[in-house]
Image (cartoon, rainbow, N blue to C red):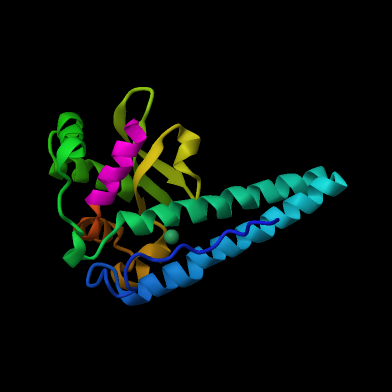
Amino acid sequence: MSNKFELPKLPYALNALEPIISKEIMDIHYNKHHQAYVNNLNIALEKYEAAEKTGNASEIVAQLSAINFNGGGHINHSIFWTNLAPQDQGGGEPPIGELADAIADQYESLDNFITIFNGIAAAIQGSGWAWLGYNKTKKSLEIATCANQDSLVTKGLIPLLGIDVWEHAYYLQYKNVRPEYLKSIWKVVNWKNVSERYAAAKK
Ligand code: MN3
């Protein structure tokens, strides 16, 4: 394969989301977990190419599964890092403009949206993600969940904001109390980034 996927640059320092997300979590999450998705995606793509050449169908199917998992992990985390920002760089500042209006239209208020979102995210069984996505057909916002590293595009939605609820995203700091993590993380959500994604999705 000529083009290898690479870990995207983190748009802030590893300790910049403290005290909401500790440097230790960020270091392991970004440098170990995300890097592993990237590495394993590249390996799976190489093996897929080789299996295609030899016509090994079961190996092709096995590698497609690895590509789905690791490719999804790479896509999801690449969005996630930009969905967050340090508090002194706009993290937690509520959305303005069209996205704020759309949230108010559909969910009454930002607080109410967060309550609904957190309820859905808290209830995800095992590992996965909660998303705010854009439904281009209905021209509306939608909250959805994905298991493991499944990509939101498989549900026909354009990802705007993803919250990682794998234990690796919060356990070192919040232990088993996922709802506490979910309550805190909005203090570092980069609504400017979510708004830009919303504007792009509507085009
Ligand atoms: Mn993760």
Overall secondary structure of the magenta section: helix
Task: Point out residue 179 in the picture as x, y percentages from the top left corner.
Answer: 26, 56
Tell which quarter ligand 1 is in.
bottom left
Q: Name the residue located 37 percent from the left edge and 38 percent from the top edge.
A: 144
Q: Residue furthest right?
A: 54
Left or right of 183, for residue 3: right
Residue 126 visible in the snapshot: no
**What residue is shown at x 30% (from left), y 39% (from top)?**
198
* Most distant residue in the top direction: 138
- Where residue 128 sits in the image (x, y, percent)? 43, 51
How many numbered circles does the render carry? Answer: 0
Image quarter in which the N terminus is found? bottom right
* Residue 30, image x, y percentages: 43, 68
Q: Is residue 126 left or right of residue 15?
A: right
- Magenta residue span: 191-203
Q: Is residue 39 above or below residue 136?
A: below
157 vs 89, left or right, is right
Image quarter hosting the C terminus = top left
